[in-house]
Every structure is written in structure tokens, then in C-alpha cells.
Amino acid sequence: MRRRSLGLALLAALLPAAAGAFPDRPITLVTGYAPGGSTDIAARILADRMPSHLGPEARMLVDNRPGAAGVIATEWLKRQPADGYTIMMTETGAAAAAPAAMIGGTRYDPVADFTHIGIVSTPPGVLVVTESLPGRTPGAVLETLRRAAPDALTYASSGVGGVLHLRAEMLAQAFGTRYVHVPYRSGAQMVQSIMTGEAQFGIAALASATPLLRDGKIRGIAMVGDRRFPLYPDIPTLGELGVPGFDNGGFFLLIGPAGMPPRVAEALNQALLRTLAEPIVRDRMLTAGHEPPAGPNDLATARAFMEREYATYQRIVAQTGVRLQP
């Protein structure tokens, strides 16, 4: 009996140590897109610096699982253990646009089925066009898009069902025309196609478009969101150019499966906040076209943010009637 009591006492003494051991193996940070796009860029910046705020032995590996604009990876994440060792860099498309707008919906609820660890970035999107598209001013380019005959122009996106697909269809609806959709597997492939002229235009994630914008290989016409971006103060918003209904920018969020232990979720949240507070990380994010959030960014704030964004896109879909074919 005494031996059993000693064993229980030893186990009780070891449990607090075990509970504080997170992480004791590498953390997998999943993205729903191929390497090189905006989601991948943000994920790799975090994977480089977050481990240093989790412990001396912590490691984080990026796992690209492209397909269906992040929907496939999100459905996969939902089924993983909620232990903090598999998390995801999600974004507006997979987390809000696809669940709200895709015909048939998705096999996950972006609020109920996940732990919302923290907001990573809230940049605007950007309407970009190939050099050969007529119009040398933003207003003239928009007039070219407005006057285009149905199916006369092609637009690129980073995947069927994502927010870039939804926004381009909203633009077609606003202009009373129709464009041909050419989907790719990442934002990097998308903007590359616009540079080469395979597609005439697209509404891109700013991080994906930034390298080509900076080199003058594609043209930035308008920001999609409620503000201009610090690195591109001369690019107006669509609202400024007289096209209403495009005040919602993008977002990037760190999530995990639902039911993550609070101490693990809190550890990941604190590591994210410390990472985003590093001046070198903020500079890398801004230079890459990401804008880290200002203000509170705890677990409750992240979940409330996701609730608001999903409700916003549900409202946009209801008001516009735009639905996306999977």
C-alpha cells in the first residue's frame, strides 16, 4: 500500500513538469497554398522567429498543403489533435469568403471548429493589371474594366472559392460585365500570370504582389480595403475611385483545432505577440506587404475578430448574391 502511495505521489509530482513542457517536439505550421504566396511568406516569417519565444529547444516547420484556396488544408486541420503541435496560417479566403460564398459550403465552421490563436496581419488587397491593359491612370484602367464586353478579359486568382475569386466576381457585378476566371495554386503564381499577360488583371494579396509592384513589372491600380498601404501611399482605394462596396481588406490569422488546452493556446498567443513586437519582424512584414495589427490581440480578441469577419462576408454574399462554384 505504501509503495502504491509513493508511486501516486511521484506521478503527482511529475505532472506539473509535464504540463509545462510544451513544446517538446517540432510544431507544424500549415498553409493552404503553395510556396511563395502571401500566406506562405507570413508563415515563414513567424516560423523563423516564434520558436525563440516558446523555449530554447522549440522548432516550427512550415507545411504547404495547397488546394481549393486553402479549404482542403482547413478541413484537414479540423481533424488534427488539438495539442498545439499542428496549427495553421489561415486567411480571408479559407476562413471567411469560402464558407460564406462557396456553393455547397465547406465542411467546417470557421468560428466553432477552431481555436483562434491570434491575428497576424490585416493588409488591404490590391487590384493589379498587366502592362498591356489600356489606360495609364487608375480611373482609365477602371473604365477599361467597366466597358469590357462579357468574357473579353481574363482575371487570375489564387484558387477557386477564395477571397480573390470572390472580389473579382464582385467587381464584375459592380461593372455589369463578366470576366473569365483563371485560377492558380498560389498568389505568387497568380501575379506571375498577370506579369506575363496570361491574365489581364486580378485582385491580389498585397504580399504576393509586392515584389512585382516594386520592380514595376505589374501595375497597382487600387487598394481593396478602407485605407492606403504605408509602402504605396500613391495607390488610392477603390472607394476613393468611386467604386463602393470594397472597404474590407484582408486578414491572416493563426488558428488550431478546436479544444486546444488553454495553457497551450496562451503560450502560442504570447509567442505570436512577442514575435510581432520585434522591430525586425514588423519591418520584414511591412516590406513583404503585410501589416501587423495594432491594439489588443489576445485569444478572446482573435475569436471575436473571426466572428465579425465571417459575419461580414456572409452579409456581403447575401447583399451581392455572388456565389462561387467549387
Image (spheres, helix red, strand yellow):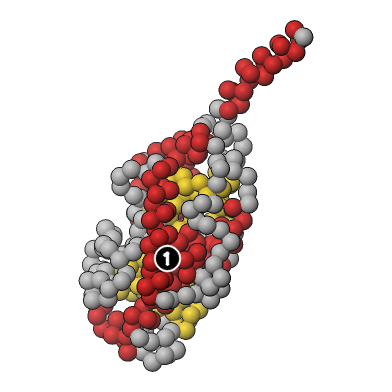
SS for tag 1?
Answer: helix
Q: Is residue 257 above or below residue 214?
A: above
Q: Is residue 187 visible?
A: no
Q: Residue furthest bottom?
A: 149
Q: Is residue 9 above or below residue 25?
A: above
- Left or right for 189, reference 247: right
Could you say which is closer to the camera, residue 286 or residue 224? 224
Amino acid type, callout 1 = Gln
- Which residue is identified by label 1? 314
- Left or right for 16, reference 217: right
Q: Residue at x 67, y 15 (%)?
A: 10
Q: Residue at x 55, y 27 (%)?
A: 20
Q: Residue at x 59, y 40 (%)?
A: 83
- Give percent across and percent down for residue 184: 53, 72
Q: Residue at x 43, y 48 (%)?
A: 303
The quadrant holding residue 202 is: bottom left
* Tag count: 1
- Give percent across and percent down for residue 307: 42, 54
The quadrant in which the N terminus is found is: top right
The quadrant holding residue 23 is: top right
**Category of crowding for the residue at label 1, using alpha-carbon neighbours closer than 10 angstroms: few (below 14), some (14–19), many (at least 20):** some
The quadrant in which the C terminus is found is: bottom right
- Give percent across and percent down for residue 253: 44, 52
Q: Is residue 319 visible?
A: yes
